[in-house]
Amino acid sequence: MRRTYRIGRLVAVISISIVFGIIAGGLLNRPRVLYAAGSRASESGSEPVTARLSVGSGVVGVDFADIAEAASRAVVNVTNKRKPMGKSDPHSTWMEWWFGRPESEDGGRPEGEAPQHRFNPGLATSGSGFLISDDGYILSNNHVVADADKLTIRLDDGSLYDAELIGTDPAIDLAVMKIDAGDRSLPYLELGGSSDLRVGEWVIAIGNPQEFDRTVTVGVVSGLDRRVALPGTDFLVAAFIQTDAAINFGNSGGPLLDKTGRVVAINTAISRGDGAEGIGFALQIDQAR
């Protein structure tokens, strides 16, 4: 009887040892499992950089046509009947900025000879602007209204109004005008903010380049807080948004809109020297407030 008990206990010990051996071996030799999104990442709050992008932040969510259709109603054409200009007129540099230096018929200009101005005495020039209130206040560029004998505003419906020049700030190339439309409530644009803009955001430029009324172009913010030595402006004061939305002669003074249709800048100038292409500058709207 005692011998049978000893054999049974030995079998039990061996059986238990085998079971523990199997378990231990499995734990030691199991393969490692690596999760694509491990618990450590979830607990730390990290996520892919694109995880929070919404449909509305991409091209699919931006309806440029709707924005252009609505905003164009508040964009105006500005005709400036200028005073006669002599050879010392400083605003001729704006023509050189847009078109380059004038050349003589043989393709050059004798060394030391001053460029011939392309303005004729009393010539009418045109640019753009936009309404910022329903009672007729308009923003534009100072160089659009400079030396004016008479300013005429043409609205989206073709109606014409004489404009009063309320004030200018040549240091940042800003002008404010006012038209009297009587009891008429005018369409106007909402001013946004330029401080929150980021490089790469969509923007829409509207204006009257080459007298093609209410031309719409689309691009992105290429750079922020650009300090550009534009004629007549203060390099240390004027801050511009750089954009690749097409801005041409006549676009000056028109609005640069964000993807919500709010004005974030005033189209001002482009760079055309040294083969530059798609480099436009617009005055940050925060400076116009």
Image (cartoon, rainbow, N blue to C red):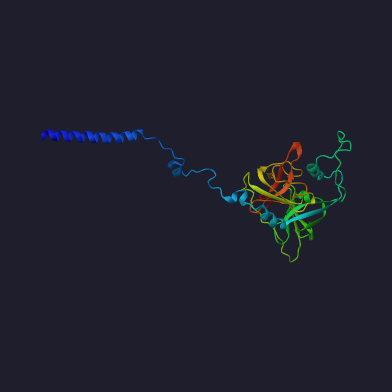
- Residue that extends furthest to the bottom in the rendered view of this protein: 183
- Residue that extends furthest to the right in the rendered view of this protein: 105
At horizontal 80% and vertical 54% (from top left) the residue drawn is 79
Q: How many marks?
A: 0
Return the residue nearer the eye: 40 or 229: 40
At horizontal 17% and vertical 35% (from top left) the residue drawn is 9
The reply, left or right, for residue 121 in relation to residue 159 is right
Question: Percent from the top left, x then y, of residue 212?
Answer: 78, 51
Question: Percent from the top left, x then y, of residue 200?
Answer: 63, 44
Return the residue nearer the eye: 223 or 16: 16
| Looking at the image, residue 40 lies above or below residue 130 | above
At horizontal 76% and vertical 40% (from top left) the residue drawn is 272
User: Quarter of the image containing the N terminus?
Assistant: top left
Question: Percent from the top left, x then y, of residue 137?
Answer: 72, 58
Q: Quadrant of residue 276?
A: top right
At horizontal 62% and vertical 50% (from top left) the residue drawn is 60
The reply, left or right, for residue 85 in relation to residue 23 is right
| Looking at the image, residue 91 lies above or below residue 27 | below
Question: Percent from the top left, x then y, of residue 120?
Answer: 87, 48
